[in-house]
Amino acid sequence: MVSQMISCLSKSSSLFCISGSRSLIPPKTYNRGGLCRFSPGFASRRLSTVNRRKWRSACISNSGKETEGEGKLQGEWRILERWEVPWEWQTVSLTSLACGLSFVLTGLTEMVALPYLGIDVQKLSLDDKAEILFLDQGLTTLAVLAVIFTVAKTFEPLPEDILRYDLKQPFNLQKGWLVWSGIGLVGAVGAIALTGVALSLFRTETPEREVDSLMKLLPLIGSSNISTLSLVGITGVLAPLLEETVFRGFFMVSLTKWVPTPIAIIISSAAFALAHLTPGEFPQLFILGSVLGLSYAQTRNLITPMVIHGFWNSGVILLLTFLQVQGYDIKELLLQGN
């Protein structure tokens, strides 16, 4: 039973796969010679976007009841609302390419720099290897986020719900990040467990590459406090920050400029699963990505999917560490589960 639980959790973890109504932004105004001037180009673009997406019309002489009713409806179905995306498809394409290149080039730079600095990774202790992994993930996260925020800065002022990290109102039933993190985590566990059971009926063995990925990480799990803290920092903080900003905060949000939010969630979840390069675990990763996307669409706060993602990843590490301390052979458990 324990081996089956560990196998289910490890397969769906991105670590083990190596891995009120919204107000519109007013037209820009600026003061020149004491007069308040109006930017018609900006206004027309905003209004055309609003009309195309069938947002609430800006009717000044409204009785108030209709507005209140529509606002309540929007609040109840926040998950269906689109974002007001200020950039076009060219920006999305080039930024995605730049993020990918930053990821690859950071890794290549580290591979060249370590021997140049006289560091032989094969001869390092487990603690040193864990620290190198933490440094690697930290540099990669900084490089990719620098690309996204540099691009986003050119479109300021941004709508308040784009690239938003907000720790306020954690218990708000409509958009509280802690409330929806808990709901999302429970939902993810249940959905992925059912998916794993269904897949086990049709699959007899785990692909070799995915078994190898697990085995490479096992020596670091529970070997020391430093190794454990490094892995928890990678999987519980850095990886969720990077992946949620890229796949939910930028890619999913950008897609809502052209497709409904539920479709954007599906597309971004597929991209999230494919990016882990573990085809055999695509269904579990797709389910996890969908839960993360739904939680973000509901709260409009990247803290929500980050917490779910972080607890999912680090929970697996801490569970395996606990089992190893209790005397279990976690390598044998994982092999039995596969």
Image: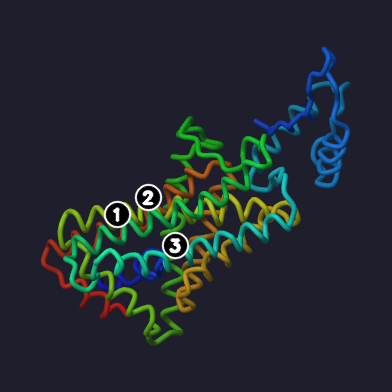
Question: Which residue is at the front of the view, 146 or 158?
Answer: 146
Q: Nearer the viewer, residue 313 or 201?
A: 313
Is disc 3 surrounded by few (<14), some (14 to 19) or many (20+) residues within 10 Å?
A: some
Q: Which of the numbered marks, if any, corresponds to residue 106?
A: 3
Residue under pointer 1:
232
Residue at x 44%, y 62% (from the top left corner): 106
Give the alpha-carbon distance from disc 3 to disc 1, as whole Å: 21 Å
Question: Marks 3 and 2: which is nearer the front?
Answer: 3
Asked if the residues shown at circle 3 and circle 2 are in contact, with their CB atoms under 8 angstroms apart, the answer is: no
Alpha-carbon span between mark 3 and mark 2: 19 Å
CB within 8 Å, label 2 to label 1: yes
| 28 shown above or below 207 | above
Task: From the top left corner, tell me how far across and down residue 301 is, in percent.
Answer: 54, 41
Q: Which mark is residue 237?
A: 2
Which residue is at 87% across, 27% downward? 59
Dot 1 falls on a residue whose secondary structure is helix
Tell me the residue at 52%/35% (across/down).
173
Where's residue 100, x and y in %?
54, 64
Position of 141 with respect to 231 (left or right) is right
Give the crowd class for mark 1: few <14, some 14-19, many >=20 residues within 10 Å: many
What SS does tag 2 mark? helix
Amino acid type, callout 1: Val
Relative depth, front residue between 325 and 41:
41
Q: Amino acid at mark 3?
A: Thr
